[in-house]
Amino acid sequence: MRYAEITGWGKALPPTVLTNADLEQLVDTSDDWITARTGIKERRIANGEATEMAEVASRHALAAAGLQSEQLDLILLATCSPESLVPASASYLQARLEAVNAGAMDLNANCSGFVYSYVTATALIAAGVADRILVVGVEKLSFITNYLDRNTAILFGDGAGAVIIEATEEPVGLMASELGVDGTTTELLCTPVDGTRGVPGPRDPATSSITLQGQEVFRRAVRMMSESGAAVVRDAGWDLDDVDLLVPHQANQRIIDAAARRLGLDSSKVFTNIHAYGNTSSATVPIALTEALEQGRVAPGDKLVFAAFGGGLTWAAAAVQWGARVEPISTSDAALPKTDKSVMEVLKPNLDFFQKGGR
Ligand SMILES: CC(C)(COP(=O)(O)OP(=O)(O)OC[C@H]1O[C@@H](n2cnc3c(N)ncnc32)[C@H](O)[C@@H]1OP(=O)(O)O)[C@@H](O)C(=O)NCCC(=O)NCCS
């Protein structure tokens, strides 16, 4: 039987930091409120294109796996903030990486997109369609976040994470998965008409930002992340006590804490980094996984659970039997360019746009 092992991992975070103190200058909020209600202290704001972040994360993942880009069979890019409607962002990334032997496609399941993509990539490898797949979660949410709307401005950030998945005969990798959606609830978290539902013409600030019914999304996120997490543990034939590390979607520290409590997992078995990056949607899980490995939180043979929730409303969970590799084979010096601009200078086009009529 063919299995699919995560053999490389990497991340890219823009150098520009938006702190809670910065947000106090923009909207009626406070560091105390944001910290207590979300756990977020800072987020990153991109100064370039999303696939620039994806490229850097991918180069680290390729180096960790000891692979060259031409050895890739497929690039699967999870995003809900694509660079264009046509082509898919994966095409831009394929060109940046010169992955000349790879196919490339985007997958949009919003904040659950990376876990959906990981499950899809594993299935393609198990079916013999591909041997080596690059799976990337990347978001430039600062494009669709209105930094003058305190309901959403505090939550979202930019970033990318990537993994390499390779075919193996060893019984490792994805042991069980659950992919779900309730498409009747799309209005709870959406950018209303920033697509072909809109009328031809320039973007309208009134309909081009993320809108969110926070409390309802919060409740559903806790329920679906804990229920789907428990389901994949059961389907993998594990007990919850067997789980070494939960790598959850980072939307709100309180969502993570409540979901872990319902699962009966001690906080020492839960990886969080939301304080540093906020919610980077499909990028949260691969960034968190990369940092968990960097911090020695994953040991050979560990049992991991990924659990995510997001717009759509989608959810996804995966029980992952880790293999032997917890150290990168090699490293890359790929990095995002530094900028002399202040965070307010980087945000100026966003603020100018939403000042003209955003909610
Ligand atoms: C958005 C979220 C942080 C709001 O937290 P909450 O505890 O639900 O807060 P509420 O919406 O009940 O608002 C409580 C009060 O704080 C106020 N408030 C809202 N945002 C605020 C802010 N940024 N700063 C200060 N006060 C704020 C509200 O106006 C409300 O005031 P009121 O009591 O006078 O009416 C939370 O609901 C959440 O994280 N939801 C999940 C969203 C998410 O991450 N989705 C992504 C997909 S996974």
Image (spheres, rainbow, N blue to C red):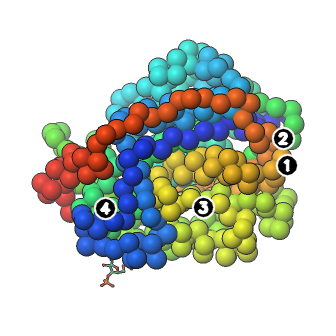
* Residue 119 pos. (x, y %): 66, 44
How far apart are labels 4 and 1 at the CA level? 42 Å
The circle drawn on residue 301 is: 1
* Mark 3, secondary structure of its residue: loop
Circle 4: residue type? Asp
Above or below 261: residue 113: above
Circle 2: residue type? Ala
* Mark 4, secondary structure of its residue: helix
Q: Is label 4 or label 3 in front?
A: 4
Picture quarter with ligand 1: bottom left
**Circle 3 residue:** 272
* Residue 40 pos. (x, y %): 46, 65
Bin the neighbour count of mark 4 within 10 Å (Cα to Cα): few under 14, some 14-19, many 20 and up.
some
**Circle 4 residue:** 22
Of 268 and 191, which appears nearest the observer? 268
For the residues labelled 2 and 1, say whether their Cβ atoms are less than 8 Å apart. yes
The circle drawn on residue 324 is: 2
> Seen in the image, is 35 located left or right of residue 315?
left
> Seen in the image, is 232 located left or right of residue 83?
right
* Mark 2, secondary structure of its residue: loop
Circle 3: residue type? Thr
Could you tell me if residue 122 is visible in this image? Answer: yes
How far apart are labels 3 and 2 at the CA level? 23 Å
Q: Earlier in the sequence, mark 3 or mark 2?
A: 3
Tell me which residue sits at (67%, 76%) in the image: 261
How far apart are labels 2 and 1 at the CA level? 6 Å
How far apart are labels 4 and 2 at the CA level? 43 Å
